[in-house]
């Protein structure tokens, strides 16, 4: 279930500066900005506060992106359908026009669409710092909307005045008390994977609407997109990231920026779902790039769940590959042998809720704090184990405390620390995981010499 919101949508042609304005208003760099038309393809949404009032700002793909979509009519149709839906659902429209270019026939078509929907509209003439922008303001007045303002999203000109106008259309209270409390404890969940594995289809299934563009060709999503929803009373911020290719295959500059942006977002997430195309398992192995992605996520200390998507399109029985996968995980990347995984069908919705529950459970374990007294009771029992009491060990674990979470990090003081071998460390780590229900997440143990 998504949160009820006052929605303000930025609408306009491609390359008029909507994403720059989105970043300026939200005080972030969440929107990908590049000097090329058609960069934004997915809807991006972020909380916005104006004069103590709360709303949600939506950045949208550019309308009438014919140059970008000339060879992709499916993409053009998907963008048009989605934009019409956004306009219908939005509470307020900020119609952005390029003041340097001036009013175009496409701008006039957009104005007709907005008037048909009967929405409150603010016309923002962007790039008003350019000398050519004066004529654009006069032309924009002819569109017949009551609010027209000059701005420069890049330099911050006119932004305060724009906020004052938006303030008039935002209700005094847009989130309920329960929703406000949920905002304070948002779990950030990133969905990552190689291109065309079904991430955007999965996002659409989760939130119950065609928010992300979906088509049967790779590279459709270029930016990380956000949406908040509620699961079992908890607010989840879902992050759909662009498909991550191997560096050798990232030729286009824009795609290189997009991939780097994707990695930054999942490294800032609390929990990560790595989506793998289940049909690729028919080759008898897991793609090397999927293993590399999983390793990178674990090294970043993130809770991880692996979702094998498109399981309904495979030729084998799911139950028959469980042992195979565990063997592949252990053989290819030992850290993965305890990572939870699940078979899903994003298109049909099979196991999607269970997948989300697993991801949230993994995060809860990552954020877990264990009492020092409980840890030291455990340490006493570990010291008595045969492995650590063998004659070749010659060290003693004296004290343990948890010094961090996400991932859980523990500090153990020991005498003769230099005698702790790798097999000792592995035994202590596994025993700690089993004793405190941490078996399917990454944890870290630091050994320090006990001062005499």
Image: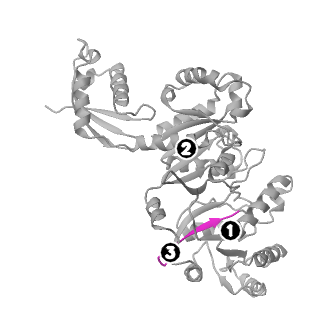
163, above or below 433, in the image: below
- Residue 286 seen anywhere in this rendered image of the structure: yes
Q: In the rendered image, which residue does mark 3 sit on?
A: 173
In whole angstroms, how far apart are the C-alphas of marks 1 and 2? Answer: 26 Å
380, above or below 109, in the image: above
Report the residue at 69% width, 59% height from top: 40
In whole angstroms, how far apart are the C-alphas of marks 1 and 3? Answer: 18 Å
Please identify the quarter of the rendering in which residue 392 is found.
Answer: top left
- Quadrant containing the N terminus is bottom right
Please tell me how crowded label 2 is: few (under 14), some (14-19), or many (20+) other residues with Cα within 10 Å.
some
- Callout 1: SS: helix
Q: In the rendered image, which residue does mark 1 sit on?
A: 89
Where residue 78 appears, as percent x and y from the top left, is 78, 56
Please tell me how crowded label 1 is: few (under 14), some (14-19), or many (20+) other residues with Cα within 10 Å.
some
123 displayed left or right of 188? right
Report the residue at 58% width, 33% height from top: 342
Q: Which of 339 and 291 is in front in this view?
A: 339
Where residue 8 appears, as percent x and y from the top left, is 62, 71
Magenta stretch, residue numbers: 50-60
């Amino acid at each position: 279930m998504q949160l009820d919101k006052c929605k303000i949508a930025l609408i306009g042609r491609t390359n008029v500066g909507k994403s720059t304005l989105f970043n300026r208003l939200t005080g972030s760099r969440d929107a990908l900005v590049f000097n090329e038309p058609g960069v934004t393809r997915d809807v991006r949404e972020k909380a916005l506060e104006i004069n103590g009032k709360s709303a949600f700002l939506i950045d949208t793909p550019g309308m009438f992106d014919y140059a970008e979509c000339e060879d992709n009519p499916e993409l053009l149709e998907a963008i048009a359908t989605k934009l019409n839906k956004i306009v219908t659902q939005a509470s307020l429209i900020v119609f952005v026009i390029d003041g340097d270019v001036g009013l175009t026939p496409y701008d006039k078509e957009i104005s007709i669409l907005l008037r048909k929907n009967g929405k409150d509209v603010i016309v923002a003439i962007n790039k008003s710092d350019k000398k050519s922008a004066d004529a654009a303001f006069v032309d924009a007045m002819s569109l017949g909307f009551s609010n027209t303002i000059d701005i420069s999203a890049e330099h911050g000109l006119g932004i305060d005045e724009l906020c004052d106008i938006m303030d008039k259309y935002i209700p005094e209270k847009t989130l309920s008390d329960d929703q406000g409390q949920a905002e304070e404890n948002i779990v950030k969940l990133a969905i990552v994977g190689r291109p065309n594995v079904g991430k955007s289809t999965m996002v659409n299934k989760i939130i119950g609407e065609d928010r992300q563009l979906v088509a049967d060709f790779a590279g459709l999503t270029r930016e990380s997109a956000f949406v908040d929803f509620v699961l079992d009373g908890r607010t989840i911020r879902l992050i759909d990231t662009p498909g991550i290719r191997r560096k050798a295959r990232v030729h286009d500059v824009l795609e290189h920026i997009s991939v780097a942006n994707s990695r930054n977002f999942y490294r800032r997430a609390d929990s990560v779902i790595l989506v793998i195309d289940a049909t690729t398992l028919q080759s008898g192995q897991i793609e090397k790039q999927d293993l590399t992605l999983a390793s990178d996520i674990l090294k970043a200390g993130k809770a991880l769940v692996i979702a094998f998507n498109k399981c309904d399109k495979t030729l084998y029985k799911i139950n028959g590959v469980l042992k195979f996968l565990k063997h592949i995980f252990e053989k290819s990347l030992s850290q993965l042998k305890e990572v939870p995984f699940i078979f899903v069908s994003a298109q049909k919705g099979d196991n999607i809720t269970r997948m989300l529950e697993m991801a949230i459970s993994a995060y809860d374990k990552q954020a877990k704090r264990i009492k020092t007294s409980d840890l030291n009771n455990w340490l006493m029992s570990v010291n008595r184990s045969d492995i650590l009491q063998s004659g070749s060990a010659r060290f003693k674990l004296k004290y343990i405390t948890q010094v961090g979470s996400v991932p859980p990090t523990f500090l153990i003081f020991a005498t003769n620390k230099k005698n702790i071998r790798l097999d000792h460390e592995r035994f202590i780590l596994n025993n700690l995981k089993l004793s405190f229900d941490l078996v399917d997440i990454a944890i870290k143990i630091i050994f320090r010499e006990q001062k005499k």
